[in-house]
Image (spheres, rainbow, N blue to C red):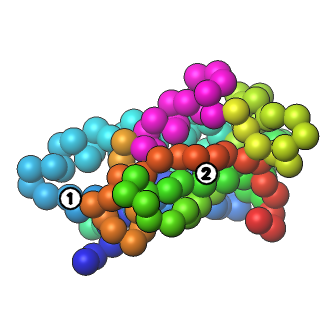
């Protein structure tokens, strides 16, 4: 079974790029309109959650350069990330993806948890979680939907 995925690339203040890659279901003539809508919502939600500049997006069969700009915030560093841990809704094992340059002002870190974030607090993170769960699929089975179970702030070496 082929693996289908999206790649959303962000640029930090130093011009370095990092990606958020998410598996998704197969795209057909019937599903493409819904996929494009869902992917647009995902990009919007991720972009709202990061200080980096949305630089490029890609999905199987398409790659679009969006911007060569640098972000304005000195805190837009690709070495700082949000780690999204997800599981398959049919019991497939956990996997994770990371989002570079998060805007920490938009999230609530739970004290004494090693950087665990409250995924229900605010508006930007719940929107991103909803968008990820809407379009995302498990990397081992592109028909299996996923649930975000944990988000945490991580550094360069995760």
Residue in the picture at 90% in, 40% down? 112
Residue in the picture at 70% in, 28% down? 106
The residue lying toward the viewer, choosing from 123 and 91, is 91
Q: Position of residue 140 (x, y in %)?
A: 39, 72
Q: Residue furthest bottom?
A: 1
Describe residue 12's horizontal placement relative to residue 40 as left or right: right
Q: Quadrant of residue 107?
A: top right
Describe residue 100's horizontal placement relative to residue 105 as left or right: left
Residue in the picture at 58% in, 46% down? 149
Residue in the picture at 52% in, 37% down? 128
The residue lying toward the viewer, choosing from 70 and 117, is 117
Q: Residue furthest left?
A: 30
Q: Position of residue 40 (x, y in %)?
A: 37, 40
The mark found on residue 27 in the picture is: 1
The quadrant of the rendering that contains the C terminus is bottom right
Q: Quadrant of residue 116?
A: top right
Q: Position of residue 78 (x, y in %)?
A: 73, 56
Q: Main secondary structure of the magenta part?
A: helix
The mark found on residue 84 in the picture is: 2
Q: Residues within 10 Å of mark 2 (few under 14, many from 20)?
A: many
Question: Which numbered disc, 1 or 2, marks the residue that appears first in the sequence?
Answer: 1
Magenta residues (range): 119-133
The quadrant of the rendering that contains the N terminus is bottom left
Q: Residue 125 lies in magenta, yes or no?
A: yes
Query: What is the spatial separation of the Cα atoms under label 1 and label 2, in whole angstroms?
Result: 24 Å
Q: Residue 61 lies in magenta, yes or no?
A: no
Q: Dot 2: what SS?
A: strand
């Amino acid at each position: 079974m082929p693996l289908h995925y999206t790649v959303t690339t962000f640029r930090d203040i130093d011009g370095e790029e990092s990606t958020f890659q998410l598996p998704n279901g197969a795209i057909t003539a019937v599903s493409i309109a819904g996929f494009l809508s869902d992917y647009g919502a995902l990009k919007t939600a991720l972009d709202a959650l990061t200080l980096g500049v949305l630089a490029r997006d890609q999905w199987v069969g398409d790659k679009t350069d969006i911007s060569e700009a640098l972000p304005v915030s000195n805190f837009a560093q690709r070495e700082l990330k949000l780690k999204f841990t997800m599981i398959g809704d049919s019991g497939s094992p956990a996997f994770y993806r990371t989002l570079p340059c998060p805007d920490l002002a938009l999230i609530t870190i739970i004290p004494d948890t090693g950087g665990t974030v409250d995924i229900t607090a605010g508006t930007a993170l719940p929107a991103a979680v909803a968008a990820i769960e809407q379009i995302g699929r498990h990397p081992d089975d592109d028909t299996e939907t996923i649930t975000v179970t944990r988000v945490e702030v991580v550094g360069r070496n995760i």
